[in-house]
Image (tube, helix red, strand yellow):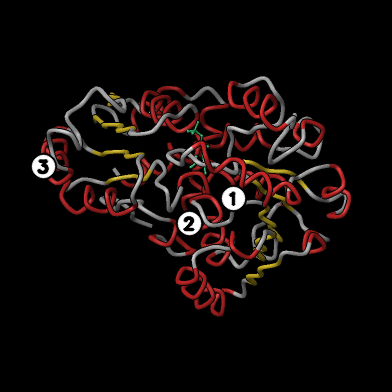
């Protein structure tokens, strides 16, 4: 399998075979790191340079790219949301052509999907999407590696997504499930179902892979799910004013003990993180003061339960991002 020179802008950029290869490679790199084979990893991309552009904040994605680059013997340059000329004084096309001359690969986190696509069109080096409003492909690799570790397979696994299924996470999970022959359920009010065009595209893929895509507003849709997945109800870049409407619409779809019980004891809880499961965050405190809610998309009880595998998932961001860089550079 040769992925050299390829960008990773959305999960649909890769075939099921290519995704399987990236997951196998991630597992290999994870084992290599755990075995302390530092010199082996250092040689994989020694002497290369990568640029990491973040127009939105990040903990996991930034740290994974930086730590993975260091493990692979590379140097990473971080460009924060305000410290460069991007967008304000220099277009994306010009930025891409400048950075493409200096770096071997570029990570981009921002707003519109078309921005990361334009960056890739002009850069001449691999570009990796570290999250846009529409998609979060590197997160899906970490999620699928985690599912494989816990269930031994992806095919036939039933992943049920609860909450706002219109944004990056549900879009990318649906596409990933379609590619890998899984069952994907969006359990949400109808107006929060994924984008219709993407559903049609994913249904076509599902016909070939045996995947099943389902959309339901009935909480019984969680029955028998292997994984219940949720994400924040208000994503980065959205106005604070939408909280009230989201809480009203999505509170019935909060992942709580009742939902986990309905799903069954085999079910594991996943979340891309960060999560609002208590009042220990700035937003959590504000929401508690305004709406009297101690938790939003997931209760603290579920988040801290033995069914939650969110920190395995977070760790796997490092190993999968490392695989993407090492495979495409
Ligand atoms: N899951 C995720 O992308 O987290 P960060 O926003 O912290 O990078
Ligand atoms: N939907 C979330 C995902 C964060 C990793 C956001 O875009 O803010």
Structural distance between the alpha carbons of marks 1 and 2: 10 Å
Visible in this render: residue 170? yes
- Residue 144: mark in rendering: 1
Visible in this render: residue 76? no
Q: Label 3, secondary structure: give it.
A: helix
- Residue 19: mark in rendering: 2
In this picture, residue 328 sits left or right of residue 22: left
**Quadrant showing the C terminus:** top left
Percent x, y of residue 258: 87, 47
Q: Quadrant of residue 142?
A: top right
Percent x, y of residue 232: 59, 41
> How busy is the neighbourhood of tag 1: few (under 14 within 10 Å), some, or many (20 plus)?
many
> How busy is the neighbourhood of tag 3: few (under 14 within 10 Å), some, or many (20 plus)?
some
Which of labels 3 and 2 is toward the front? 3
Structural distance between the alpha carbons of marks 3 and 2: 31 Å
Which of labels 3 and 1 is toward the front? 3
Q: Which residue is mark 3?
A: 94
The residue located at (42%, 24%) in the rendering is 67
In this picture, residue 60 sits left or right of residue 177: left
Percent x, y of residue 208: 54, 78
Q: Earlier in the sequence, mark 3 or mark 1?
A: 3
């Amino acid at each position: 399998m040769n992925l050299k020179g390829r960008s990773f802008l959305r999960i649909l950029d890769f075939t099921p075979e290519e995704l399987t290869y990236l997951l196998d490679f991630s597992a290999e790199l994870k084992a290599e790191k755990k075995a302390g084979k530092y010199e082996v990893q250092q040689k994989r991309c020694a002497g290369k340079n990568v640029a990491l552009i973040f127009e939105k904040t990040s903990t996991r994605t930034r740290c994974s790219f930086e730590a993975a680059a260091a493990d692979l013997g590379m140097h990473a340059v971080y460009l924060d949301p305000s410290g460069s000329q991007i967008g304000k004084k220099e277009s994306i096309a010009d930025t891409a052509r400048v950075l493409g001359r200096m770096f071997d690969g570029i990570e981009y986190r921002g707003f519109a999907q078309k921005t990361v696509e334009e960056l890739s069109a002009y850069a001449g080096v691999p570009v990796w999407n570290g999250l846009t409003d529409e998609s979060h492909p590197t997160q899906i690799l970490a999620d699928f590696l985690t599912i494989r570790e816990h269930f031994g397979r992806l095919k036939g696994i039933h992943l049920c997504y609860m909450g706002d299924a219109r944004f990056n996470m549900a879009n990318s999970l649906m596409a990933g499930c379609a590619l890998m022959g899984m069952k994907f359920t969006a359990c949400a009010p109808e107006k929060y179902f994924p984008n219709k065009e993407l559903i049609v595209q994913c249904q076509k893929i599902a016909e070939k892979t045996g995947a099943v895509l389902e959309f339901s507003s009935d909480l019984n849709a969680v029955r028998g799910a292997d994984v219940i997945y949720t994400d924040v109800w208000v994503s980065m870049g959205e106005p604070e004013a939408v909280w009230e409407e989201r809480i009203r619409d999505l509170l019935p779809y909060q992942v709580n003990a009742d939902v986990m019980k309905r799903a069954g004891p085999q079910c594991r809880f996943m979340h891309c993180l960060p999560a609002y499961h208590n009042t220990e965050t700035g937003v959590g405190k504000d929401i508690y003061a305004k709406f009297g809610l101690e938790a939003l998309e997931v209760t603290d009880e579920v988040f801290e339960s033995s069914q939650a595998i969110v920190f395995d998932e977070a760790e796997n961001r490092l190993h999968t991002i490392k695989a993407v860089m090492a495979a495409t550079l």
